Every structure is written in structure tokens, then in C-alpha cells.
Image: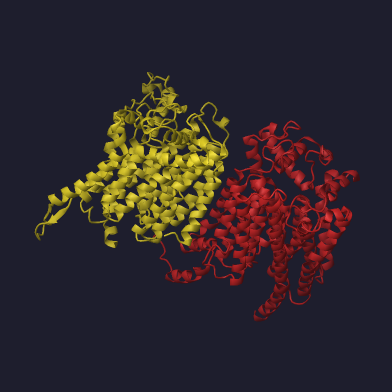
Chain colours: A red, B yellow
Amino acid sequence: MAPSSPQPPARQATSASRRAGVIPVDRWFWFLAEENAQGIALPVTLLFALLVRWCVALHGYSGHGSPPLYGDFEAQRHWMELTVHLPPSKWYFYDLSYWGLDYPPLTAFQSWACGWVAHLIDPSWVALDQSRGIETHMSKLFMRSTVLVLEALVYVPAVVLLFQSRHIQVNWVIRQASIFSVLLQPCLILIDHGHFQYNSVMLGFLLWTVYFAAREQYLVMAACFCCSLMFKQMALYFAPAVFAFLLAKCFRSPYGVRLFVQLGLVVIVTFGVMLLPWMGSPAQLQQILIRVFPVARGLYEDKVANVWCAINIAVKLRSMFAAPVLLRLAAAVTSVAFAPSCIHLFLAVKRSVAGQALVAADAAKLLCYALVNCSLAFFLFSFQVHEKSILLPLAPALLLIHEEPWAVNWFVQVALFSMYPLLFKDGLQIPYWVMAIGWSMLRSCPACPADKRTPLAVLNAQWVSTLVMVAIHAANMLVPPPPSLPDLYVVLNVLFSCAMFVLFFAYFNYRQLTLALVRVRATRSKKKDS
Amino acid sequence: MLGAKNLAFLCVGVGIKLLLWPAYHSTDFEVHRNWLAITNSLPLSKWYFEDRSEWTLDYPPFFAWFEWGLSLAARWWDPRIVQLDNLGYAASSCVEFQRLTVIASELVLFAALGRFVQASGGTRQSKIAAALTFLSAGFLFVDHVHFQYNGFLFGILVYSLAFAMEGRDLLAGTMFAVLLCFKHIFMYIAPAYFIYLVINYCTVLRTRRRSPVGGCALDIGASAWRLAKLGTAVVVVFAVAFGPFVALGQLPQLASRLFPFKRGLCHAYWAPNFWALYVFADRLLILASRFIPALGLTFVDLSGLTASTRGLVGDTSFAVLPDIPPIATFIATLLAQVPAYVVLIRKGSKKQRGPQRFIQAVVLCAYASYMFGWHVHEKAILLILVPLGLLTAAPTQRTLRMFAVLSTAGYYSLFPLLFGAQELLIKAAVLLIWVLCALALLKSDRGVSAWRCLLRAERLYVLGHIPLFIATELLPGCVFGRLQFLPLALVSVYTALGVTYSWLGLVYEFALHHSHSTHKRH
């Protein structure tokens, strides 16, 4: 047996000084590095992420045991049932009152593929009409495992590749800690594997979009974004930023026009392929459009931490204006909100192209900021927003976790808090508390006294915010709300979360507008040096 | 002791365990619920007579008192938990309560391991060994999914071993007596304790003269005084535990509950020990007799063939090889424990690394009982792995190799406990994480990681669990056709190979091998 290599003597000293102000996740990876065990870091992270997901999946889900309509779990299962047994021409028409299909075609195809597998294993899980509300142990396991498999196929590889790619210039520990944190981000796990949805697929395609942007492969990037859009129309929240980015790239002098035409072709072909089964009849296409964009539903549903819902507490907008007026109002305000970041993205990418090239890494980083700002603008100001939609701004924000550690940690904390009423309905309190405390312990700064990277003012503010959240939770548990205000705690949750999201929106906008200028100059001087 | 580092570490463990609440729980869950009801509803005199449920109280009195203590909280939490006739009660409040008691009582193990780390001088490797023990796949499977209170009980054992490491032998002995009154399965390692305490604690030597031969003599007075102290302590512990029942004249009833000798040689699923290989050899000979009549095995009686493979807790019968009476397993166990005694009695064992030797003896003692005992449960592997885990704080290369092989095989052998499709991912992910961490983070005393220590064949054996998992757990049952027992038998035999191999290796390392080099370094 070969004797081991002696340990480098300098390592202990340097690592000790570096570890002084490090959050527990980083410390774990420092530890692995010191033990010469870097090889197990990624496998252990992936296995742990898998374990946590499956453990959360043991708990309740949306509409568990609540006939006649059940919830999102039944909706997804129902789509498998109808796509397997019916021709595509009937998919968007079949019994619309019972969870009619209202997502774009890629979701329908996914349902069809999953339904096909289910049909092979046990036809009773997806028997047409007969299987409504089926919740056997095995059918539940099957549904849970489809989420796991799809996430492992689309989302997880994108996260790993993104953080291991060259465009993120941080050391090994931060890289690994970022992968760990993004994969164990509580909100997505609780919604996808608890509440039951397939958001990770849509968000996974978005991450692939960013990945290919960083690799300067714009055609693949456009195709990925089209897939995201065709999986869930909610990806439109990102569309202005992606559009601004690609348009700016088209202003590249010699090949710009060619790129523009190519991008157009890619988009048309991608959409065309996905809509192929319905291409024959305009009535079909129109029906898809109506199902996918239910503008008739109203300004917002339930209680969601966006501006309209918050304003509604004081001013009853819905009774003052008709729905079409509100739709236009929301559209206008949203456009104003996302305009600055998108215009800035466009100008920064375009100008840098004209003068000194903005390196792909910085362009991708700028794109991430713009994606956060754009989707947050939609979340706060657009029409028909769900509380789950906060997952959309979270996804690109998490890609910035190594740039903005405290802001992203905090953002995740508040986002999770804003989803509490939903998770409570699904019987997911235990996973909620475990994940919330776990995230705070491992990642978020106030919990660990050793953190020295965060400014003191931020730490204090974060303490205050944590205390407010804990106080609302405690009051919710201990004091029954007055009979005149039965939704008191939900409303408090909405108000607090909305205020925080507005602050985050301002902060990320500020960061985007100031950061890019610095970066352009920095890359210039770098160029001179080299 | 509870710094930020430990806290984060503890929280991750507790978090996963909390998330596991809705997972499968075995009949042991109802067993313990029933004990809560018995101890809460009935007077002491009826504890060991109550038999409305088939899950009668069959642990020693301290455990019954422990359940009584829990039942007070249970009554406050949900009074239906402690109703005697509420058999099979498993509402979510009951599950939450019982799971929570397991997690809370496991803190004893956490504290004990903290003590162990202190006793080993707070070295980095001892911390890693302690962490791997606390978050071991074994406790997660057996306690937090299957449902038992091993974490708490092994906490007491680790406390006792840590006291021995600190040189506080009297306390160590007393703790062990207490442990025996909690769960009598720890009798497996009682011989090691007995001999260690007699030699190390009760024998006081006095230097008579400065003679070159090393003139030492027994200091009878001091020895007798220590013997009296130890004896008193042990007697007091046992009197507290069993005294009330002796006074009630219930000792025979207690004994019949604690030692039911009605069971077969092997458990429903063969724990991977020597007898599993023996049963397997028997089955192979049956096959051989079919194809090679020349062997003269035509007299084989095939009627009892299926008994030990169909999951009945009945008697195991053999077709070719001779039947094994309980007394034979008893003698085999005693013989197999001889190396443990050798470790303790060996020359110089007292002065040089005495407590280390003691833990080695505990390991070998437990190992012998596991290998040759009557009706051994697969869960008993913890009895070997926990003390051996403590030894991995500064192991020789061979110890580390044997630990790697044994822990992989031993924890894998717990898989059949969690047989549901829902737990498939959990057990695979947990074991993989644990094995990856153990192989990469445990270092031999020369600083070589466990994986690098392993020989090629051992590496292949460890990796072989992956195809074994695919074959026995992922393939649909119909592949095996009539041989429904084959997956379980495969797991049992494959893991038994590793367990037996490690046993031989550890016996050689601890009892036979004179590692002079180790002594030089220290």
C-alpha cells in the first residue's frame, strides 16, 4: 500500500484564518478540502439533496384527501390521464370544469410521457375518468418520483454545470457551497416535492438559458428559453430581459443581422415543433391561447404578497374598476417597473459590444440581475399572480448567491415565509419549519455569529426581519385572530412580505445599475493589463 | 461543549429525522406504545403480567421506568396514547410524540459522544469518528424509521466506555450495570466488562522491592476494598431495578419474559452471521444432492426445507447438515469470545493503552455473540459497530479496513428491515452518504484515508453492494420466480461474507498481532 502524501504544513494556518468568518455551509466544504476529500463533495451534495427532497415528499401535498376537486397533485395526475387516452385535439377541450389543461404544450407532452409510464406500470392510476381522485400509496409514490426524475434531468445538471463553469470566478469552496445552497433552497423543494408541481422543469430551462448565454451560444439559449416558455407560460416574467439581451447581441456589427434572422428561425421552429399537433386548425390554437392566458380571472387570486393585494387592504381596487381596466393598469405599471433594468441590460450589452467587449461572464451576470429584476417586477405588479410565482425571481437570484450572499439568503427567507399560508393548507408545517430553520442555520447570517462578511447594518435589519417573521408565526399559533378579521395573520404576512420584496426589488435594481458600469471599466483595465 | 459548529451539525441530523416522521414504522412502534399504556395505566405489580396485547413488556425494569416517564408526557400530549385497549393506535399525534421521544432521548448519545471526544483529547479524528457514529445509517434506519430507542441506550454505553477511557472504572462499571437493567441484550458484552474490571480495577498491585524481575504483588487490602465498592455499586443498581419485583415474588415471571427460549436459530431474515452461511451451505448441499446422487445424500428430508426461508419465526430445520441445539451456539459463542479475553489478559495490556484494549475486547465480545449467538437480530450489528466506531478515532490500517468492510456490510444488512418502496431511496441515499463520508474522512494513524487503506479485493467487495442493491431491490420480484426468498438470502449471504471476514481480521489485529511499531510511535 502506498504511504499517504504528507499534509502540506501551510494549509492549517491559512485555512484557520480564512474560516474565521464563514457560514456553516462554507465551513463544511473547507473541512472537506482540508481533509483532502474534495472528491466526495459533489456526490454527497447531490445525495443529500435527493434525500431531503424525498423526505419532504413523504409529507402532504396540495388537495390531499379533499374531494371533489382535490388540488395541484390531482390536476397533474388528471392531465396524465387525459393526454394518454385522448388525441391532442381534445387535450385543451376535455371537461374544462375538472382541472382542464391550462399549461402550454410542453407540460402536456410531459404529462403524456409520465402518463404513458404510469399506464405501463398500473393502468388504474391513469384510467380515463375512473381514476379521478386516486390516491393510493403506490400512485402517490409514482407521482412523487416523476417530479424527482424530471428535476434530476433538467434542473440539477444545469445548476452543477453553471457553478462549475469557468465564468464564475470563485474558489472551490464557494463553488461547492453555492451548488449545495441552490439545490437545497427550501422554496422550490417545498413547492415541487411538497405542494406538488413541476416548476423545476421550467426553471431548469431558464438556468440552461443562462448557461448558454455565458457560453455565448445564443441560438441554443433561445431554444432553451422557448422550452421554458412552452412548459409554463409564467416564464414570460423573464421574457423582456432575455429579449433585451438577445436583441443587444444582434447589434454586433458584422454578424448582427444574420444572428437576428437565425434567432427568429430558432424561435419559430421551436414553437412550431411544439405546436405541431394543433397546427392544422386555428380554433385549436386559439383555444390553447385562451386556456393558457386566463385574463378573465381577475387581478389576483387568493392572498399573494404583491403590490395589488397589499394595496387592496386599504383601497378596494377590484370594486372600483372593471377587470379590463385593471388589466391595462397592471400591464402599464409592470412595463414601467421592468423597463429600467431591461433597458440598462440592453445598453450595457450593446455598448460593450460596440466598444470593448463585455466578457461573457459579466454579460451573464448582468443577465441574471436583469432576470431577477424583471421577474420581480412582474411578481409585484402584474395581473393574476400566484404566491408560488416568487419562485421565478428566486431562481436567477440564487445564481447570484456567491455575489450577493446576504441579500439572496435573506430573499429566500422572506420568500419562504410568504408561502407559509399555502404550505400550511397542504399540511407541510413540519417540512416548512425544518427547511426554514435549516436554511437559517446553514446559510443565513444572523444565525451564525461568526459571519463577518455582512455589513453590520444589514445584520441588524435582518435580525429585525427575522424577529417580525417569528412574531407573526408566534401570534398565529398562540392568539386566535379576532372574528371580525379572520385573515389577520395572512394579511400581516402579505404586507410584510410585499414590503420586503419591494425593498429587494429596489436593491437588486440598484445593484444592477451600479454594478455593470464598474464591471465594464474593470474589464477594460484588465484588457490593458493583458 | 455545544458550540456553533456542533449546533449546525446537530440541526442537520435532527432536521432529517424530523422529516422522516411519516415514513414506515414497524410493529416495534406499537410495542413501545403498548408499553407506554401498560406502565401508565397499571400498577407495578402487573407490568410483567399484562398480556392483552401480544407485545408484552419484555425489557428489564429500567426501560419500563423509562417508558413510564415518557407516558406521563404522553398522557399530557394525547391521552389516547396511553389507553390500554387502544391497540394499534397510530394517529399522527401518536406518531409525532413517539418519534419525538426517540429524537430527544438520542441526545444522550450526542452528549456521550461529546464526552468521548473530550476523553480522546479532542482530536480531529475523534470528532469525525463521533460524528459518524451519531449520524450513522444504523441509528437512522433502526431508530428513526423502523422505530427503537437504541440511540439512547448506546448513549449510556458510550458514556460507560468514555468513563473507562478517563480511568474512572468504578463509574464505567456502574453505568454498565444500569445499561443492563435497561436492555439485557448488552449481556453479550458483559464478559469483557467483567474481566476488564477485575483486572484493571479490582487488582491493585504493590511494588514490593526494586527487583529487576519486576517484583509486584497483589495488594490484598486495597483490592478487596475496590472489589467491595464495585460489588456494592452493582448490587445497588440491580436491587433498585429488580428489588420491587423480587419483593412481589415475580422474578420467575420476569425471567420468562426477558429470556424467551422458544425462538429458532435464525431470525426470519437471517442476520449475516456464521449461521446464515451454515443455512446457506445446507441449501447448497440440497441442490447438490439433486444433481449429484453419487454423493449419497439421497436420504435428505426435504419437508422442512422452506421453514427458514419463508419468514416464519419458527424453528430452523436443516436437510443435510446437523441441526444446531441452543447449547451448541452457547458453547460456540464462549469459544469465540476467547480472543476477547486474550486481549484483556495479554501482558502489558494494563499499562499500555488499557482502555483502548478494553474497547477492543468489547468489540470482539459483541462480535462473537453476533457471529454464533442463538436467534441473533440483524440490529445487533450496532453492538459491534458503535464501540468499533470509537476505535476509529486513531486506528491502525487493518482496523480501519475491517471497519470499512464491516460497516458497509453491516449497515447494508439492515436494508431488509425497511422493505417498502417508499423507503428505497431513503436507505440507499443515507447509506451512500455515510459510506462516502466514512471512506474519505476516516484516517488511519498514519493519515491514510480509509478508502486508500482498502485492498483491491476489499474495495471490490464494498462496491459490490451496488449490484447487490440493483439485483435484490430494483429488479421486480417476478424475476426470481419460485425462489421468492432468493433476494433476502443473497443479501444475507453477501453481507455475512464481509462480516465474517472482518471478524477474522479484527481477531488477528486485536488478539494475535503484536504491533510493536504502533507502540514505538506513541
Residue B125 in the image: state x and y as whole percent: 40, 58
| In the image, residue A60 above or below residue B2 | above
Please state which of residues A330 and B138 is positioned toward the viewer in this rendering.
Answer: A330
Residue A17 showing in the rendered view: yes
Above-or-below relation of B126 to A17 = above
Query: Would you say residue B507 is visible in this rendering?
Result: no
Residue under the point 34% across and 28% down: B261
| Percent position of residue A147, x then y | 66, 46
Judging depth in this view, the residue of B57 and B502 nearest the camera is: B57
Instruction: Give the x, y percent position of residue B38.
Output: 43, 33
**Total count of labels:** 0
Task: Give the quadrant of residue A324.
Answer: bottom right
Which quadrant holds the C terminus of chain A? bottom right
Residue B171 in picture, x, y percent from top left: 28, 50
Viewer-closest of A459 and B210 = A459
Q: Is B344 or B38 nearer to us in this picture?
A: B38
Q: Is residue A322 left or right of residue A447?
A: right
The image shows residue A82, relative to residue A486, as above or below, that is above
Query: Against B72, is A513 above or below?
Result: below
Left/right placement of residue A316 relative to residue A397 reads right
Residue located at (39% from left, 20% from top):
B300
Left or right? Give the position of B461 relative to A251: left
| Residue A65 placement: quadrant | top right
The quadrant of the rendering that contains the N terminus of chain A is bottom left
